[in-house]
Amino acid sequence: MMFKRFILVAIASVLAINTYSQVAFVLDSLPLNTPPTDTFFMASSLNSWNPHDIEYAFNIDKSGRRYLTLEPTRDTFEFKICRGSWRSVEINADGTDIGNRYFAKGTSDTVYLNIKTWRDFVPKKQMASTASKSVRFLPTIFEIPQLNRKRTIRLYLPPNYSTGGLFPVIYMHDGQNIFDNATSFAGEWKVDEILDSLHTYNGFSAIVVGIYNDDKERVKEYLPWKNDSLGLDSEGDKYVKFIVNTLKPFIDRHYRTRSDRENTAIIGSSMGGLISLYAALEYPDVFGKAAIFSPSIWIAPKLNIYLQKYKRKKIQHLYFLAGEKEGEQMITDLNKTLELLKKSGFDDEYYMKTKIAPDGRHAEWFWSQEFGEAIKYLFKF
């Protein structure tokens, strides 16, 4: 009770300045053996799911309870709690991922959170791989010379790969999440199962190259331009150059690919959607197709300036996806981007298609649900 009174007093003092705008998130219970010196963070659709954003770090009150006071910039948003990394994100007690938490503005001024356990508390042997036999790792950690870093790359080879022939290639970001629940930080897309099904029932086959993210560098790597107002540096151009100049040539040399632009796609969600759009527009000779799911347009205000000057150079196919339950800003930002793209030459559904799903949220289950439809549009079958 003392802590609740403390929170209410704290909120009241803030509300005196900014009426009915602040919300307190309180860690009401934590798993046993949670390191007492760890810092807790909220990763959310408000901060591009950054797991170590200092602006979203929890404070400690006099009683030792951890709390985060926010002034939400959107009517609704989704979030999870972590300890500075997706490797230490909250999960269910049985080791399975939890769905994104959801907040709607006006429902409460204090939100109490109970953490069941952390991902790094669950032995890996308890997390069975859900990747199909068609998924494999590249034998060594891949060098990114443009960024002086290394990265894990995971491949999906279609069921008929061993029979010969050449195959289109799909490059995807956040590779931890696309094939395997055991490696994901927010659930998996089931890309391997979906493509296996498309092969069986539609005769479509493709190679998928899943590029793992580095959670500490993810925002920078997926951001095409600096965001001066947020103090964010950009490494997006170097990251895309890695895909174009280093990774793609390696894949084309070592696997039986159709390496032309008409058979090369790039796909991502959230920040990965933003960098996929940039890659497709900046390198139309490389990427003939792109699927852009729930793009974090808000974090890249310079995108509008870029698009105002942009003119479509090649025949490309862009597929956009967003959900109405991702919040008003997502839909508003996306509609502005779509209007600029139409003016730049993507003025027909043959070039660009958009789906706004009434039930869509900023979550892997949503992107998984829509992945097959995007593939059918991009590859025209």
Image (tube, rainbow, N blue to C red):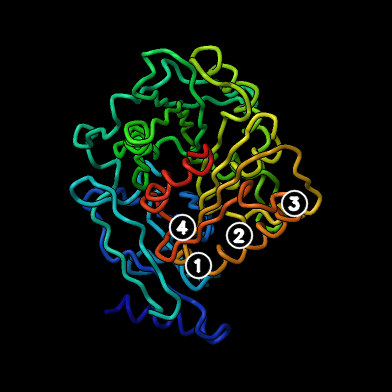
* 2 or 4: mark nearer the eye: 2
Question: Distance between the Cα atoms at labels 1 and 2?
Answer: 11 Å
* 1 or 2: mark nearer the eye: 2
**Residue 69 drawn above or below residue 307:** below
Q: Classify mark 1: helix, strand or loop.
A: loop
**Between discs 2 and 3, the one toward the N terminus:** 3
Q: Is residue 188 left or right of residue 358?
A: left
**Between discs 3 and 4, the one toward the N terminus:** 4
Q: Specify the label residue 307 is tagged with.
A: 3
Query: Mark 2 is on which residue type?
Result: Leu
* 1 or 3: mark nearer the eye: 3
Q: Percent position (x, y) of residue 336?
A: 67, 62
Residue occupying the point 60% across, 28% down: 243
Give the residue at mark 2.
334
**Between discs 1 and 2, the one toward the N terminus:** 1
Q: Is residue 65 left or right of residue 273?
A: left
**Between discs 2 and 4, the one toward the N terminus:** 4
**Residue 362 drawn above or below residue 246:** below
Question: Distance between the Cα atoms at labels 1 and 4?
Answer: 12 Å
Query: Mark 3 is on which residue type?
Result: Leu
Q: Percent position (x, y) of residue 335?
A: 63, 62
Q: Classify mark 3: helix, strand or loop.
A: helix
Question: Distance between the Cα atoms at labels 1 and 3?
Answer: 23 Å
Give the residue at mark 4.
44
Give the residue at mark 1.
327
Query: Mark 1 is on which residue type?
Result: Gly
Mark 1 surroundings within 10 Å by alpha-carbon count, few (fewer than 14), some (14 through 19), many (20 or more): many
**Between discs 1 and 4, the one toward the N terminus:** 4
Q: Quadrant of residue 343?
A: bottom right
